[in-house]
Amino acid sequence: MNNIRKINYLATGCVLMMVAACVPKSLVPVTKTENRNTPATYNGSTSDSTNVAKIKWKEFFTDPKLEALIDTALLNNQELNLTLQEIEISRNEINARKGEYLPFVKLGGGLGVDKVSRYTSQGAADDMSEIRPGVRTPEVLPDMMVGARASWEVDIWHKLRNAQKVAAQNYFASIEGKNFLVTNLVGEIANSYYELLALDNQLAIIKQNIEILNNALNIIRQEKQAAKVTELAVRRFEAEVFKTQSLQYEIQQKIVEAENKINFLVGRYPQHVDRSSDNFNTLAPTKIYAGLPSQLIINRPDVRAAELKLSAAKLDVSIARANFYPSLGLSAGLGFRSYNPLYLVNLPQALITSLAGDIAGPLVNKYALIAGYNTASAKQIKAIIEFERTVLNACIEVTNQLSNIDNLDKNFNMKSNQVDALTQSTEISIKLFKSARADYMEVLLTQRDVLESRMELIETKMRQMNAFVNAYRALGGGWN
């Protein structure tokens, strides 16, 4: 028993000496840690933990036609389906890494013929021996074997287990990447849908304005016949009609492109997009509850993915350091071997067994291992910076969208007042023109101003709805 203990102590001492000899003293451990601190609020907003990101997108968007488009996209979007295949690849990588630290067992057999030289020690011994009683050993000797062989690298430094954990973290990061893609997909479809509604309303305004301009043109022509205005006035109004009609075709082309952008996102060929364009100006976004900046680490899939990649990078450093340590390998074999197949079943004479262990570690020329460790360390620092940058970007995105919502709300109110004032001035200018108290240019400029202001009002409403969608997306909503 004492001898066994001495052997154990000696083996342990040898391992420790090998570890000390294998690990270079020049290796510098990574000391940088990620900064997880976030502001208490978004630019002085209330510190309320109520967060709109927790609301499912089917509850956030109330237009059933928009919901149908999003549902279709989540099934057919090609980029999303490609990402799902990347996730499957990452999942298989976990099983591959798991198999590396389990024993490898191979079952097989072999058949051969062996002839040794008479003028060797083995050949001379065979010539003087009998392979069985009364039968001399033949010069040409068949060799048949069947059995199993196992090999196993004992994961004493958890290098292989950490590699599996890295694969698992990358797998979960790929899932978060898919969630982030879903968030962006939902937001992009919603923004494109509201853009399409805005274009429909702008097209309706242009058609109304063309009708108004044609009516004004008829009045100008009557005034010209009465010699109250010149041909110049008629031509100026005709030019304005043509200009507005050309704008109509521009809007129609934009509608086609907006529809096909949605069709691409939902994974289908060009077709009409069913939508509800009426009462677009009366759409009122619900109040956005932003919660706390610290909730971004939980709610934003891209932040969660960056956090998982950082965890994987830390494990990669541990793996790179473990590569300097000696590895312990075990191998064993069990089978049957004979020169005659009839003797393969004879036990224990035909039985062959083996058991071996080896321990080895790098001693000289460790530049590749040192470079691998330094690379893993640099990647960890890079992952830390990327995590901090992702959190910073998320916080800034939310702050920008919250400010955008507030300013666009005030902007829309001012634009509405402008449209009301210009609409009234249009009616007044026409009355004054009929009574010869205003010239045709005042009517023309007033008509142009009211068209531009109504178009701008629609565009402001679209930007308002986009800010509403983008704030939901920036807070991490849309993927759950």
Image (cartoon, grey):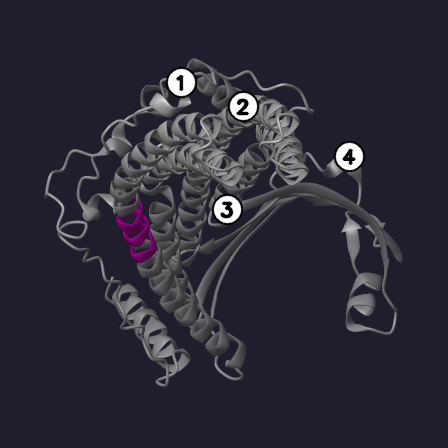
**What kind of residue is marked 4?**
Leu
Residue type (three-letter) at the residue carrying disc 1? Asn
Q: Nearer the viewer, mark 2 or mark 1?
A: 2
Give the residue at mark 2: 212
Give left or right: position of 197 versus 13.
right
Q: CA distance from mark 1 to mark 4?
A: 93 Å
First of labels 2, 3 by sequence position: 3
* Location of residue 189 with respect to 108 vertically, above or below: above
Residue labelled with disc 3: 103
| Residue type indicated by callout 3 | Pro
Crowd band around label 2 with a 10 angstrom C-alpha radius: few (<14), some (14–19), many (20+): some
Q: Mark 4: which secondary structure?
A: helix
User: Which of the two labelled residues, at mark 2 and mark 1, occupies the earlier sequence position?
Assistant: 2
Q: Quadrant of the C terminus?
A: top left
Q: CA distance from mark 2 to mark 3?
A: 85 Å
Q: Nearer the viewer, mark 1 or mark 4?
A: 1
Q: Residue 407's mark?
A: none
Q: Residue at x 25, y 40 (%)?
A: 410
Q: Going by the image, does 32 lie left or right of 155?
A: left
105 lies left or right of 276: right
The residue located at (30%, 66%) in the rendering is 8
Q: Tag 2's secondary structure?
A: helix
The numbered dot on residue 279 is 1
